Image (spheres, rainbow, N blue to C red):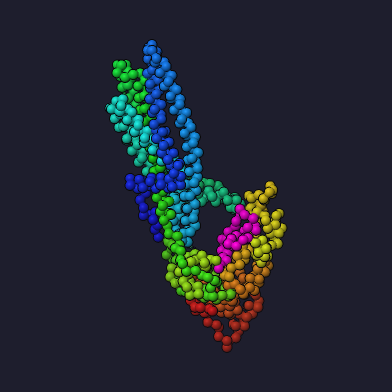
Amino acid sequence: MTTESAARPRRLEPAQYARALSEIVRLSARTSPLAVTMKIVGSIVAAALPLVTTFFAALTTTALADAYAGTDGAGNRAIVYVIITAVLGLFMVAFNSIDRYIQRSMQYKVGAKVSDMMFERFLSLEFWRYDDKDTVDLFDRAKRFSEAYPRVLDRLATIFTQVVSVILSVVTLFFVSWWIALIVLVAILPSVYLQFKLSRAQIAHWNSHIEVRRRRGMIERGMLQPQYISELRVYGMVRHLLGLRRELRDEDEKRRMEFEKTYIPKQLLGDGLQAAAEVTALVWVVRQIVLHTQPVGQFVLVQQVVSRALSSANGLVDSLSSIDEDLANLFDYEAFMALPVRGERERQLAAAPETIAVEDVTFRYTGSDVDVLKGVSLTIHRGRHVAIVGENGAGKSTLVKIIVGLYAPTTGAVRLDGVDLQDLDVNSWHEQLAVLQQDYLKYDFATALENIQYGDINDPPSRERALAAAHDAEAKEFLEKLPRGIDSYLSNWMEEKGSRKRGTQLSGGQWQRLALARNFYRAAPVVIMDEPTSAIDALAEAHIFRRLFADRSRTIIAISHRLATIEKADVIYMLADGVVAEQGTHGELVALRGRYYTMFEAQLSDRDREQDTDVDDSPERPAPEPTVAAGDAE
Ligand SMILES: Nc1ncnc2c1ncn2[C@@H]1O[C@H](COP(=O)(O)OP(=O)(O)OP(=O)(O)O)[C@@H](O)[C@H]1O
């Protein structure tokens, strides 16, 4: 699947440039009109003031030369010019201070708005997009823009100042001598053009090597995670990864340097042209002064203005390079913000459904050519306890994600009381659900109590409910033993409120019990759990499931590899290679001696095995037929 970014050319046409610029100015002006006005006025002042100052410096020099030659009143004139220059400087300093304050406040406001919008969009995309490489690439580039946004208007203002400065300098030179103005202009244009091309090549380079940088980023992030460091060290991976990271970094830099090298001769040519123009202008003005056709101060004026024109042009090139990239990223930002989120559906699910029906569901992940589910059908009635089992990779988690509504089936449907989930407001379904996934969240910035209460943020937080949930999840006992009980922080990077005491680190099983407690706290009528007790000891697991399965008010769908979780279920679905291979109660499936029996043979009790032997030994009793794969158990 391609996304918009893949199809869009990276090079910006002039019209795109203009649109990007106006878009940025529009957004900024909407957020802070005063700041944008100040920016425009400030840019003009910043461009004109140095020239005005130079003009007075030239007058001062001429006046001084006159005073030196004994001309009456020339000394006083020089003093007046010096005072005017000082007042202008003071004005500029005061203006800059006020401007800086206003700009900072605008940068914060605009930057916060842009990044808030981006995060919101990212978190509400259709679920398949998180698996889609093009979307993630686009997000990376859009994020760069949102991070750079507060600087973009600043850069725009700088460009504006530099353009005005070049124009005013050339116009000033024109009044001194038209052909000096022409020479300077001719020297400026090629170097601006060359630098501009270089900056575009840099962007192309950046975008063509995003893979290398992402791989490096993943390695760097992984190496800095405290929970990974022990394995990295024990396996001697630190040196290996450092080497890999160095290789990727050096490779990236080498390619960058290689193409920049191709621009060196051209850049030298541009610099040479500029130097020649400056020398020509100075030689010309020196000769004019010697011939008395120009006043002495004209040397200061020409020298300063030529150098200002050239430095503004060079600065302009630098600014254009950076804004060029920022503007290209603006289009990525726009493309990202235009990605469709899951469309809101009007139809609401008012209460927990009486039936959840998976109808002939086939599913294929984006970018894959393999069907993970191939015509799965099952129906779950309200209050029933269902287990889904199967080997690793059989498609269990995928099926559950489809039931939750995170992925849409490729073909087939999930119907809640007969209504296709795709036609429902999925949030109204999520309100009925408590889902515990394999990779559950660990809110390590929060306390244990908050970790449980995050299970239901719609109702006011309740301590009693949290304690009851912790009890049901066999978490209460260990939580009470923490330094501040259930109010303890759960990371030793966090400090306890009001003390210098650090938070506590939990074990894997303790974290899982806490996640279960969060699931129970939600008190949802439909509970979905993907290997909820994989890290929990057998005794605690038995207690948890005894309580859970005693509760007939909830529908439970549990994926598990542990018999203790499964055997009490009303129906067990055995998935194999994306199809329902067997289904029935524990007893029925053991008697069947099929895949289920083989898979759990090692965990079966003697009673189960005896039952199996009985079946084998009775010739008159036919072996039960395996239930139809795509059939309906209930
Ligand atoms: N995001 C994804 N993108 C592409 N393929 C995926 C993705 N997630 C899972 N798969 C593939 O789908 C198949 C089924 O995965 P799934 O996680 O549903 O299996 P499972 O039965 O839950 O396995 P386990 O018991 O290991 O949890 C696997 O072959 C897996 O490689």
Q: Quadrant of residue 40?
A: top left
Please provide percent x and percent y for residue 139.
45, 53
Q: Nearer the viewer, residue 348 or 179?
A: 348
Q: Nearer the viewer, residue 560 or 485?
A: 485
For the C terminus, the quadrant is bottom right
Relative to 209, residue 76 above or below? above
Q: Which residues are magenta?
A: 432-461
Please provide percent x and percent y for residue 377.
49, 74
Task: Give the residue displayed 36% in from the left and 53% down from the top.
Answer: 8
Q: Is residue 579 visible?
A: no
Task: Give the residue displayed 36% in from the left and 54% down from the top.
Answer: 7
Q: Quadrant of residue 297?
A: top left
Relative to 497, residue 159 above or below? above
Please provide percent x and percent y for residue 173.
32, 27
Q: Quadrant of residue 619?
A: bottom right
Task: Give the residue displayed 52% in from the left and 73% down from the top.
Answer: 356
Which is the main secondary structure of the residues drawn in magenta? Answer: loop
Residue 454 part of the magenta segment? yes
Q: Nearer the viewer, residue 299 or 516?
A: 299
Task: Give the residue displayed 39% in from the left and 56% down from the top.
Answer: 4
Q: Is residue 284 visible?
A: yes
Relative to 416, residue 46 above or below? above
